[in-house]
Amino acid sequence: MRALAALPMLMVVTACQAPPAEMTEADYDAIVTEVMDVTDAMMDAWSAFDVDASMSFFHPEKTSFAWASTIYDFAGLRERWTEVWGTANGQETSWTGRKIEVLSENAVLFQGSFELKIFYSDGRVVLYPGTAHWTTLLEPLNGHWKITYGSYAYGGAQTVEGG
């Protein structure tokens, strides 16, 4: 539901940007829509703890992703998600804000903030109330937008339930 609330703000941010000179407005809008769909599907994969689906959004050869203080390649990122999700029973995620800048037909800069609630095996529920942030570069691969370079940072969290 929060993603729907953020949609008008996203449209304002992307609508104010002019497409690159070599691109029509329709092509620009189509790319923005595709990236919105990718990032929505990524949230669904995260909430389902689906490592395979989550990794499908990353470029298998060009991934360089900074998560906290470590830079991961494709295999390392898969391992990291497997570890993190192995300590929890569930997760709820939703975008609180997104900005998409189409740099060209071959490059899109995405920035997003999201709320993250993690349900741990020990009973704790930890909430990142819109303090989790992604910045990524997406490039086309076989007709799909894939994350190549990016970073994930998160700010303050609070335990909202349990021990």
Image: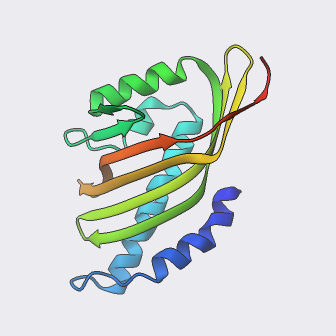
Direction from residue 96 to residue 16 in the image, left or right: left
42 shown above or below 105: above
Direction from residue 156 to residue 23 in the image, left or right: left
Quarter the C terminus occupies: top right
**Residue 144 in view (yes/no):** no
Residue positioned 50% across, 49% down in the render: 133
Farthest top residue? Answer: 122
**Residue 102 in view (yes/no):** yes
Across and down, in percent, residue 124 comes to 73, 21
Residue positioned 41% across, 32% down in the render: 52
158 shown above or below 41: above
7 shown above or below 65: below
Farthest right residue? Answer: 161
Residue positioned 32% across, 40% down in the render: 65
**Viewer-closest of 124 and 30:** 124
Across and down, in percent, residue 127 comes to 69, 36
Across and down, in percent, residue 114 comes to 58, 50
How many marks are shown on the rendered structure? 0
Q: In which quarter of the image is residue 59?
A: top left
Across and down, in percent, residue 79 comes to 37, 22
Direction from residue 122 to residue 143 in the image, left or right: left
